Image (spheres, grey):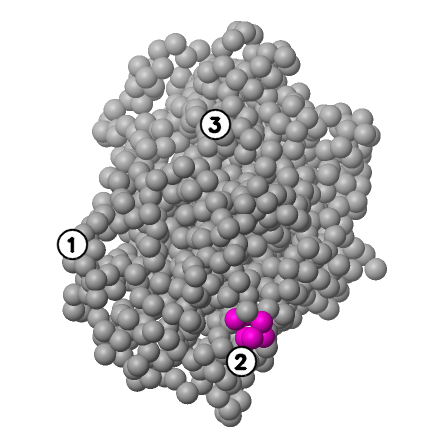
């Protein structure tokens, strides 16, 4: 008997009363009169920065202004003209190390906790984590209220990976002092893109 | 309504004035209260230590002694909680709902702490005793999390405090609550003699928080908490007095 | 009557400043949790749903495990099943050996701690690098975690600063600023991520309907561990599998709010398969006792645990004794219960490290009756043969005394004599009460005598 069969056999022999699944449709999850306003507030609370982009504004110029000292910029987004590296064509994931700014796309944001859903849309997802600074392009109108709504709409593609990112990486493991920039992005800037 | 007075072993032996205050207060409110003789203990100390079966004969005696009453009232949240939560199970769990017969365990269900009895059953609204002092409220764990005397600080529920409601009926009183209003005092029954260091530290921390309110007295619904804190306070040279809630409610009556 | 815990706790409390800091630190986390709970109208409803989802799921686990494994395999992951810790370690080693792995980075996993995986692999020549900062710190120090979410919380910034200087991680001697130290750790760990051959993660959740492994971190170390190395192994305890995303929403919203008082972890990552330039993703489902515990009528609900740590943060005993006082690798209320399920002989001593205040079960996001279960373990100690003989004797004595109203009456009649026993006798080792308390004064008349003056 395989371990799988042994485990399941043992489980079935031991399990006692079986309980029904509760109804989840009556959860009174928090909603906001203006989800975007809450999203921006929470983003700032978790250490992120949010910039609203007017139609026609050139984000490449803006990014240069935000990070004047940046040398290596990694992105596979067609609208980004200032990239010096491409996570689709880079040889090895580790070669993305030393990236000053990674620029990626987010699908939608979550108002209650500033999460942004980022499905993998590049060969090397390391760009989302290895970059010192992360810029996420997020469609302004795509903000949901809470994680229940979020989990009803997340989508995956063939890469088979996606993540919710809420602000920069952080830790309080040393004497409970909160420090931004643990192992991944030290800053996160969300550019709210017009439709 | 006939009320039987249950006086826990340590109230009987160490804090009889609390029993007297309970009796006097109930009589003052016109309640037909009787104190059946030959009471001993509810069995909580043994159960707490891991020998709950030893509480069974005590539970049987309790059933017998109090079955004729409509309510059994005790000035102790820990004993009341132990009786209500455990006696039905210890006595075999037979209730009319389950077996359609017998009155076993009905008595345990009628057992109430004096605070909840006065607040929920008698629904006292009139002014009670006189106690022109500042008191810091000690929300004993059994009262908060088993009998529902107050909203637990852990929960998102509408805030309430039955002990405080009753104390507001006392003339001249000023009721405050310490920081960490329902953190445990560290008595825990056997815990106080098994984990002596942690128990004493918890008691000291709690007394210091009560003192920090500027109150002259610590008051609460259970003498075991008060006894523990008083003992720690004396040993540490911490200056504050201790009175059971019912003593304050009955003060001057 | 002392246990390992009570002795260790006594030592812990001998440093009052440190003990006070430890207590205040965890109370602060409890306060942050309270703020989160107060900030959501639906908090108590979520707890009820979370508890009900878990009760359903862990009592239908055979169906969900099959569904999970099938969908994970459809995604392209390789699924293994480990009966126990030893088999788990063997499977991990087998995979690493097949891929010629010399160094593996890993994100936090209490499951790997439970299976003692690190020493197993290190004995076979594989370097294991913890990448959660707290775990890395204690790994370098050769210590075990003292808390399941904040493993290095017992160390202050000077401890960490000196450690980093000793290990060559920081270069500015005497600079113990947490921001500086975190940055130095970042540089050091960045090098590890780039040169590791494999990355291991735990799993906060496994989703049966889709085959996802879900990992929640604040540091991004699970994602770094799986973005650069070419091999990802995920270790998941059986009970971590949940039905679908609707259920996940409930738990994701509660996990971090309960555990650290944040609305979310920075990263909530879903892994269905390896990235195109890497080898297949391996998922190892681990039993190690869980299929047995489900049959324990009093204690099966401990399997609902999502390892948030909030029970420890609220436990007044944990805060004043620290993780190392407990004999099991998981401390506090859930650790007392899990330890007893693991080994009643080794861990019975923890069962008295509790006042039964029930704060733990009032914070627990999945409503495990942690305190009630500790009470139940106490009732079983005699059957296990681990009941304390002195306590047993005391209770027998009380039983006799309280069983006889006549004897009880006699005892209360003589108790005032205790008032005049000299304190040097009262304070002897035989009277543990006197260690922390002044003796109470026994009144001349017990209540049952006094009442006679008041009754008509």
Label 1 element class? loop
Q: Residue at x 41, y 37 (%)?
A: B237
How many neighbours does mark 2 have within 10 angstroms: few (below 14), some (14-19), or many (20 or more)? some
Q: Which residues are magenta?
A: C404-409
Instruction: Identify the image quadrant of residue B47.
Output: bottom right
The quadrant of the rendering that contains the C terminus of chain A is top left
Q: Are marks 1 and 3 on the same chain?
A: no
Residue beneath label 1, please? B172
The answer for which chain carries disc 1 is B
Q: Residue B61 has which mark?
A: 2
- Magenta-span inclusion, residue B67: no
The quadrant of the rendering that contains the N terminus of chain A is bottom right
View extreme (top): residue:
C172
Q: Nearer the viewer, mark 2 or mark 3?
A: 2
Task: Look at the image and tell me whether residue B33 can be seen.
Answer: yes
Q: Residue at x 24, y 27 (%)?
A: A56
Q: Position of residue B54 (x, y in %)?
A: 62, 70
View extreme (bottom): residue:
B101
Q: Residue at x 66, y 49 (%)?
A: C1
């Amino acid at each position: 008997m395989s371990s799988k069969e042994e485990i399941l056999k043992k489980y079935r022999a031991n399990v006692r009363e079986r309980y029904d699944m509760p109804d989840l449709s009556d959860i009174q999850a928090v909603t906001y009169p203006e989800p975007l306003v809450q999203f921006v507030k929470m983003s700032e609370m978790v250490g992120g920065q949010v910039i609203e982009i007017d139609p026609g504004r050139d984000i490449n110029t803006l990014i240069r202004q935000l990070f004047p000292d940046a040398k290596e910029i990694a992105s596979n987004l067609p609208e980004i003209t200032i990239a010096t590296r491409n996570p689709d064509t880079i040889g090895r994931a580790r070669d993305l190390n030393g990236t000053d700014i990674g620029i990626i796309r987010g699908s939608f944001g979550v108002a209650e906790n500033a999460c942004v859903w980022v499905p993998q849309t590049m060969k090397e997802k390391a760009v989302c984590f290895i970059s010192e600074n992360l810029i996420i392009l997020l469609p302004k109108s795509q903000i949901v209220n809470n994680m229940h709504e979020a989990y009803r709409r997340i989508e995956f593609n063939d890469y088979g990976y996606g993540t919710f990112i809420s602000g920069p990486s952080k830790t309080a493991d040393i004497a409970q002092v909160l420090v931004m920039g643990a192992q991944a992005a030290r800053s996160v800037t969300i550019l709210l893109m017009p439709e | 309504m006939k009320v039987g007075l249950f006086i826990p072993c340590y109230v009987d032996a160490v804090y009889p004035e609390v029993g007297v205050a309970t009796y006097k207060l109930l009589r003052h409110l016109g309640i037909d209260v009787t104190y059946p003789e030959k009471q001993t203990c509810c069995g909580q100390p043994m159960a707490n230590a891991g020998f709950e079966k030893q509480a069974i004969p005590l539970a049987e005696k309790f059933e017998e002694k109090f079955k004729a009453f409509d309510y059994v009232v005790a000035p102790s949240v820990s004993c009341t909680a132990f009786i209500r939560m455990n006696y039905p199970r210890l006595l075999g769990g037979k209730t009319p709902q389950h077996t359609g017969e017998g009155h076993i365990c009905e008595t345990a269900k009628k057992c109430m702490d004096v605070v909840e009895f006065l607040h929920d059953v008698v629904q006292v609204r009139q002014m009670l005793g006189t106690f022109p002092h500042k008191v810091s409220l000690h929300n004993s764990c059994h009262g908060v999390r088993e009998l529902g005397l107050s909203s637990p600080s852990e929960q998102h529920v509408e805030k309430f405090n039955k002990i405080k409601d009753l104390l507001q009926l006392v003339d001249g009183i000023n009721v405050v609550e310490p920081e960490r209003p329902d953190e445990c005092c560290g008595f825990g029954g056997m815990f106080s003699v098994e984990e002596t260091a942690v128990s004493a530290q918890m008691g000291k921390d709690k007394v210091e928080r009560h003192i920090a309110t500027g109150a002259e007295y610590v008051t609460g619904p259970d003498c075991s908490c008060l006894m523990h804190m008083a003992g720690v306070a004396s040993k540490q040279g911490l200056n504050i007095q201790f009175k059971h809630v019912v003593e304050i409610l009955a003060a001057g009556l | 009557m002392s246990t390992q815990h009570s002795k260790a706790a006594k030592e812990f409390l001998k440093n009052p400043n440190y003990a006070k800091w430890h207590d205040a630190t965890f109370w602060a986390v409890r306060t942050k949790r309270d703020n989160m709970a107060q900030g959501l109208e639906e908090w108590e409803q979520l707890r009820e749903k979370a508890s009900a989802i878990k009760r359903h799921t862990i009592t239908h686990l055979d169906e969900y495990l099959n569904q999970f494994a099938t969908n994970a395999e459809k995604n392209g992951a390789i699924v293994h099943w480990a009966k126990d810790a030893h088999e788990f370690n063997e499977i991990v080693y087998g995979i690493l050996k097949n891929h010629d792995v010399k160094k593996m980075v890993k994100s936090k996993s209490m499951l790997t701690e439970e299976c003692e995986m690190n020493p197993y692999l290190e004995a076979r020549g594989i370097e294991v690098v913890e990448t959660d900062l707290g775990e890395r710190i204690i790994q370098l120090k050769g210590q075990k975690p003292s808390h399941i979410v904040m493993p290095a919380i017992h160390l202050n910034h000077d401890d960490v600063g000196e450690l980093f200087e000793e290990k060559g991680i920081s270069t500015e001697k005497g600079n113990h600023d947490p921001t500086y130290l975190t940055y130095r750790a970042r540089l050091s760990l960045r090098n590890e991520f780039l040169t590791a051959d494999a990355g291991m993660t735990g799993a906060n959740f496994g989703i049966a309907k889709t085959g996802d492994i879900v990992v929640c971190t604040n540091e991004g170390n699970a994602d770094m561990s799986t973005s650069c190395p070419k091999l990802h192994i995920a270790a998941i305890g059986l009970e971590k599998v949940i039905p679908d995303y609707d259920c996940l929403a409930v738990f994701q919203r509660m996990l971090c709010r309960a555990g650290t008082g944040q609305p979310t972890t920075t990263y909530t990552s879903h892994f269905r398969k390896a990235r195109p330039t890497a080898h297949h993703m391996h998922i190892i489902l681990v039993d190690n006792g869980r299929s047995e515990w489900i049959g324990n009528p009093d204690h099966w609900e401990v399997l609902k645990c999502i390892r948030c740590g909030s029970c420890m943060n609220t436990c007044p005993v944990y805060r004043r004794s620290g993780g190392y006082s407990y004999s099991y690798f998981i401390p506090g209320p859930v650790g007392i219960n899990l330890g007893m399920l693991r080994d009643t002989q080794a861990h019975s001593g923890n069962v008295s490290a509790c006042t039964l205040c029930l704060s733990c079960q009032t914070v627990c996001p999945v409503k495990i009756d942690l305190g009630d279960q500790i009470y139940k373990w106490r009732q079983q100690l005699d059957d296990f043969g681990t009941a304390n003989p002195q306590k047993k004797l005391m209770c027998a004595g009380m039983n006799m005394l309280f069983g006889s109203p006549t004897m009880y009456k006699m005892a209360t009649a003589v108790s005032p004599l205790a008032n005049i026993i000299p304190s040097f006798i009262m304070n002897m080792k035989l009277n543990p009460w006197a260690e922390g308390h002044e003796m109470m004064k026994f009144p001349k008349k017990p209540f049952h005598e006094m009442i006679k003056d008041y009754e008509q």
